[in-house]
Amino acid sequence: MSSETKMHGLVHLQDQPDAEEEVVVMDFDNLSVLHATVSNVSEWGCRLTSVDVSRLYKNVGIWPKDADTLVKAQVTSVKGSDAALVFAKSEKSVSDKRREKRNNVSIPVKIADLEGITEIEGRIVDAGNNGVRITAKGLTAMPEEVLLTMKKFDKPVVAEFAWRNETSAGLRLLWNRTLEQNEDENGDEDADAGDEEQQSA
């Protein structure tokens, strides 16, 4: 077993968007303990879901089942019953891996919701095949999934937040999702609405 696997007790769920697991979470700041579901695990962090997630403050330990150590993390945002966390203990490991897979860049980018109603400007500072790190203001106000528009690409890229705070964020690039899929879904809804109007007329 590698030292990284020992350190990161959630590595078996990493980069599997649909994988989730029941865990126990301890808040080191207020010593509260709660049961939660961990999902959306990446090299940076994960999502916790629990009706009690608002009890968490900042510094937490995640206890995966069958593990003998906690995974240390920090809460970056809480919305409803979900909390976004960034792993604290694996910071060195992540930076080492980024040297191999990621490039330090400075690329202007526009971040918008899928409908294109809200848009903010930012900069990609770290880029890889499956994820990027960006800096921008107002990131916590954006939805879970966003569109990234860059001059380098002809079409916007759909991405989802792995973690975020007020001024920076890590995003997973969803290459299998296209803007056309969203438009098709919306188009079907519009068509249904039109049929209903005709029927009522």
Image: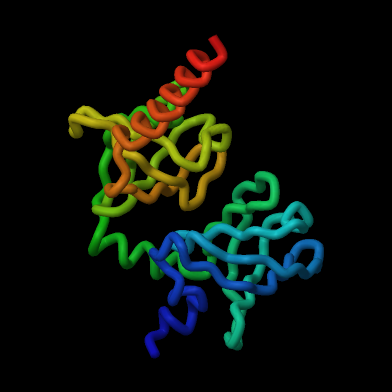
Above or below — where is 145 with respect to 197? below
52 relative position to 181: left or right: right
Task: Write the residue at 47% across / 69% down.
Answer: 90
Report x, y in % for residue 115.
Answer: 44, 26
Task: Write the residue at 42% across / 36% down.
Answer: 146
Most foreground residue, 100 or 117: 117
Report x, y in % for residue 192.
Answer: 46, 26
7 relative position to 68: left or right: left
Locate the C terminus by quadrant.
top right
Q: Residue furthest bottom?
A: 1
Q: How is the image coloured?
A: rainbow
Please state the total of marks drawn on the protein image: 0
Report x, y in % for residue 113.
Answer: 45, 30
Q: Is residue 100 visible to the viewer in this orientation of the structure?
A: yes
Task: Write the residue at 51% across / 17% down.
Answer: 199
183 relative position to 31: left or right: left
Task: Write the residue at 61% across / 82% down.
Answer: 65
Most foreground residue, 121 or 89: 121
Locate the N terminus by quadrant.
bottom left
Q: Is residue 112 visible to the viewer in this orientation of the structure?
A: no
Report x, y in % for residue 128.
Answer: 26, 52
Above or below — where is 33 with respect to 130? below
27 relative position to 146: left or right: right
Above or below — where is 133 with respect to 149? below
Most foreground residue, 139 or 59: 139
